[in-house]
Amino acid sequence: MSILVDENTRLLVQGITGKEGQFHTRQCVEYGTKVVAGVTPGKGGQEMDGIPVFNTVEQARQETGANAAMIFVPPGFAADAIMEAAAASIEVIVAITEGIPVLDMMKAYHAVKSSGSRLIGPNCPGIISPGRCKVGIMPGPIHLEGSVGVVSRSGTLTYEVVDQLTKNGVGQSTCIGIGGDPVIGTNFIDALELFEADPSTRGIVMVGEIGGSAEEDASEFIVGSVSKPVIGFVAGLTAPPGRRMGHAGAIISGSSGTAQAKIEAMEKAGITVVRNLGELGKTAVKVFDK
Amino acid sequence: MNIHEYQAKELFKKFDIPIPQGRVAFSVDEAKEIAEELASMPVVVKAQIHAGGRGKGGGVKLAQSIPEVESVASEILGMTLVTHQTGPEGKLVRKVLVEEGLEIDKELYLGVVPDRATASIIFMASEAGGMDIEEVADSTPEKIIRQRVKPGDGLQGFQGRSLAFGLNLEPDLIKQFIPVVAKLYNLFMQYDCSLVEINPLIITKDKRLIALDAKINVDDNALYRHKEIQDFRDLDEEDPMEVEASKFNLNYIKLDGNIGNMVNGAGLAMATMDIIKLAGAEPANFLDVGGGASAEMVENGFRIILSDRNVKGVLINIFGGILRCDILAQGVVEAANKVGIGVPVVIRMEGTNVEEGRRILDESGLDLKVATDVWDAASKVAEIAKSA
């Protein structure tokens, strides 16, 4: 089993005719994801590798029964694309796009919340339930079907973590990249809640980074609400304050958002915190296979 | 993006938020000219750099006469100002803001920032103005009052009133304060700000409300739609190597260590810096070549890392996803041939097309140390740092 995406996922891709949209749609199809539609305004009626393209999300959903969306629309139009998917009652919306203005995202965030849809990202690698369904840009072959949930704010760092788990024989139920932006749809707590409720997930790996207080909030949540073992890692112990470290959300401002504070909060909550990234896989074996 | 105080005040002026009279000066003569125009004493001369704590560092001075304006301006212009935000090397002052001096009755704080957790905009106000607001928040959090605004809903009248009453303002000042809140909100939204801060917002002895200082940061992701803000960019305030890197869409931040590193993805780049430190060496930079890096970007990345004279070794850590390992390997080989790499290089590659990438490196004849995993890579590079 898994969370949010599986063999019943019927995916539509917004921005399917663009270079990235095309490339990653093919990769998802190759992995086994059912891609049922694409949306590019003005290109309705065309096809991409036999996948029908529509002008609007609403139309695509009605014609194909799509229940999930993956967004590759450029940053200036991406918030609009998210809101379009939410308005069309798409259940799971995965926004890959990096660089969406924060104020645009704030509006989209509230639109999604009031619609009942779930947004993952933006600025994220997406979500994968190994062996079942991939909705995102992560390399499929590094994953292994199993029962550990992974939730992360990062992209390639998630691949590193997953690769180590796989090489140590620790398979994954679902891996979610929640994104590196300040305003994101699904946060650590949402993901932890889903993993806790998923009977096929026996443990969780949580990968954080500097900036904001999401890791601290999640740690507090874990104390009362998560019974499964959790392993944590936080990137950015050596990051200087006041500098944006790539991700829009990764910035230490004043005394808040430091890696040290996050690690302390995690340890206080009983999370096994890995300090040496190279040991994450081995630690997972120890913690989850006890 | 950060802008200068004088630029922020230009925006304030445009939105009719009251500021002291004055202008920016690039020379002592200009400073004198502005002081003469102001025709009142005292005059305040403020260093314009992208860092806080200017007053404590000696970058803000009061002058009581025109000759004093000249001497103060010549003192500040050209000085290397060191504050808690500049780092020990400080920043060269190239311009000063020359303003009328005002008689202060009370200092307030008013700031606007986005709140990640609630996806809303927070107004923060405090009677403890003029101080480091972080300190106020830590030691006396009850002295900060807040109002949250959802961008879809917009600022409501009651929110301005709540802030005004919370600051215990007199009726006359409430009338001045509420419009300032509304204008600040409009400015924040119109320019996609990530911070607008007035500290202090002063009440003068003659009961006027004036923004004595102004700090604005604008969301980098939204700069494309604000030409006016783009024009405010001051390259003198940025590290030349970081400017160079940005030309190639590389995300580079210079640090103080001696181990250069090049990584794809911001999270992995930070984690790589951390593991270098854990292995006993110090990272010389943060460099994210991004998800879709080309061989050319890798080459430029190399050139920028190596232009830092402190660098004694380089660690390349790439997890191939969209960026394929063979592309990276080609970039490394081309860079080595063109730039000439005079320091030891440790490479750790994993992911898409890793075999092909390793073959390219093997056949290049370059002296590269290939690492099996992240810890192995960090240990190897730390060894280099020790012997350097």
Image (cartoon, coloured by chain):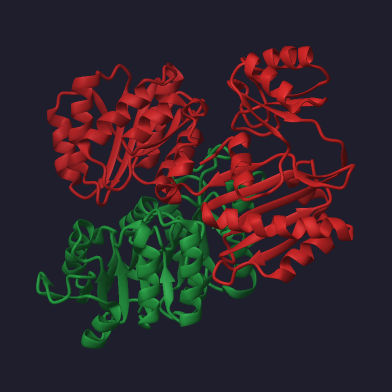
Chain colours: A green, B red
Examine the rendered structure and indicate whether residue B133 appears above or below residue A137.
above
**B39 lies left or right of A18:** right
Q: Position of residue B322 (x, y in %)?
A: 25, 51
Q: Quadrant of residue B184?
A: bottom right
A252 or B119: nearer the eye? Answer: B119
* Quarter of the figure with the C terminus of chain B: top left
Residue at 48% from the left image edge and 35% from the top image edge: B233
Can residue A102 be seen in the rendering of this structure?
A: yes
Examine the rendered structure and indicate whether residue A113 appears above or below residue B66.
below
Q: Quadrant of residue B217?
A: top right
**B44 lies left or right of B16:** right
Q: Position of residue A236 (x, y in %)?
A: 51, 44
Examine the rendered structure and indicate whether residue B238 appears above or below residue B221.
above
Residue at 35% from the left image edge and 22% from the top image edge: B306
Q: Quadrant of residue A9?
A: bottom left
Residue at 67% from the left image edge and 70% from the top image edge: B156
Residue at 56% from the left image edge and 51% from the top image edge: B194
B85 or A231: nearer the eye? Answer: B85
Can residue A279 be seen in the rendering of this structure?
A: no
**B153 lies left or right of B212:** left
